[in-house]
Image (cartoon, helix red, strand yellow):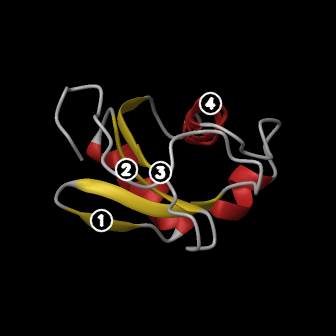
């Protein structure tokens, strides 16, 4: 998945919006993204974001999982994405997701 995202028109990833757009673009071939949570990188961890997503059907998720060798955890597909050193998005510390809960 990391390689497919790096080859997208949205790379390099310097913020959450660019990364989100790239993920949605790559996943569009398989289905519609219905859930996406991007955990920010922590400085010193090689600047990788942990991403968790769901698609609009289990068949679409199975195809995406198979194509990119993704892992599944607690009902979501998960993967790591390398982001640019110029990352301007949130880094480290607690993050509040769109649902209002701290992650």
Q: Which of marks 3 and 2 is nearer the N terminus?
A: 3
- Give the class, few, some or many, for how many residues have Cα within 10 Å of label 3's Cα (few <14, many ≥20): many
Q: Which of marks 1 and 2 is nearer the N terminus?
A: 2
Residue contact between numbered discs 4 and 3, judged by CB atoms under 8 Å: no
Tag of residue 40: 3
Q: Which of marks 3 and 1 is in front?
A: 3
Residue 14 vertical placement versus 4 (above, below): above
Tag of residue 91: none
Q: Earlier in the sequence, mark 3 or mark 1?
A: 3
Q: Nearer the viewer, mark 1 or mark 2?
A: 1
- Residue hosting label 1: 72
Q: Which of marks 1 and 4 is nearer the N terminus?
A: 4
Dot 4 lies on which element?
helix
* Side (left or right) of 19 relative to 54: right
Residue positioned 50% across, 71% down in the render: 69
- Residue hosting label 4: 21
């Amino acid at each position: 998945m990391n390689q497919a995202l790096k080859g997208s028109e949205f790379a390099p990833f310097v913020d959450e919006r660019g990364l989100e757009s790239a993920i949605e673009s790559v996943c569009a071939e398989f289905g519609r993204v219905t859930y996406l949570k991007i955990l920010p990188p922590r400085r010193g961890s090689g600047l990788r974001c942990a991403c968790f997503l769901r698609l609009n059907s289990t068949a679409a998720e199975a195809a995406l999982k198979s194509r990119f060798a993704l892992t599944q955890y607690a009902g979501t597909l998960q993967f790591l994405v390398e982001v640019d050193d110029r990352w301007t998005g949130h880094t480290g510390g607690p993050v509040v997701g769109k649902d209002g809960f701290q992650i």
